[in-house]
Image (cartoon, rainbow, N blue to C red):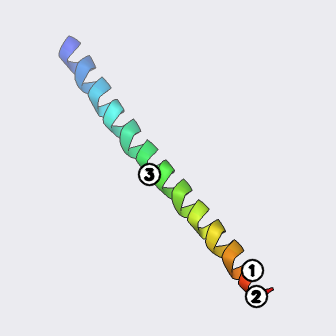
């Protein structure tokens, strides 16, 4: 039973790490998009 719990915890941790990476990646991409948008608005003014 203990082994199963450890495996479950490891799977959970890996999942959380992947999920967190995806979130931070998408946040970075969104920030880059916003910066690009602001730049294009500045240059059109």
Q: Secondary structure at mark 1?
A: helix
Question: Residue at horizontal 45%, vertical 43%?
Answer: 20
**Where is the N terminus found, in terms of image quarters?**
top left
Let me know if residue 45 appears in the view.
Answer: yes
Of 44 and 3, the residue lying toward us: 44
Q: Residues within 10 Å of mark 1 (few under 14, many from 20)?
A: few
Foreground label between 3 and 1: 1
Q: Please tell me whether residue 20 is drawn above or below residue 22 in the rendered image.
A: above
Asked whether the viewer can see residue 1, the reply is no
Return the residue at label 2: 44
Q: Is residue 18 above or below residue 3?
A: below
Question: Does the residue at mark 1 contact the one at mark 2 (Cβ under 8 Å)?
Answer: yes
> Where, by quadrant of the figure, is residue 8 drawn?
top left
- The tag on residue 41 is 1
Q: Is residue 16 above or below residue 1?
A: below
Write the residue at 76% across / 87% down: 44
- Where's residue 45, x and y in %? 81, 85
User: Farthest left residue?
Assistant: 3
Q: In the image, 38: left or right of 21?
A: right
Question: Of the residues under marks 3 and 1, which one precedes in the sequence?
Answer: 3
Any mark on residue 22, and which?
3
Q: CA distance from mark 2 to mark 3?
A: 33 Å
The residue depicted at 43 percent of the width and 44 percent of the height is 19
Q: CA distance from mark 3 to mark 1?
A: 28 Å
Which residue is at the far top? 2
Q: Nearer the viewer, mark 2 or mark 3?
A: 2
Relative side of 41 to 28, left or right: right
Residue drawn at x 65%, y 67% as measured from the top left? 34
């Amino acid at each position: 039973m203990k082994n199963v719990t450890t495996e479950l915890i490891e799977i959970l941790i890996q999942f959380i790490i992947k999920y967190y990476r995806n979130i931070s990646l998408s946040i970075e991409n969104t920030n880059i998009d916003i910066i690009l948008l602001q730049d294009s608005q500045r240059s059109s003014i």
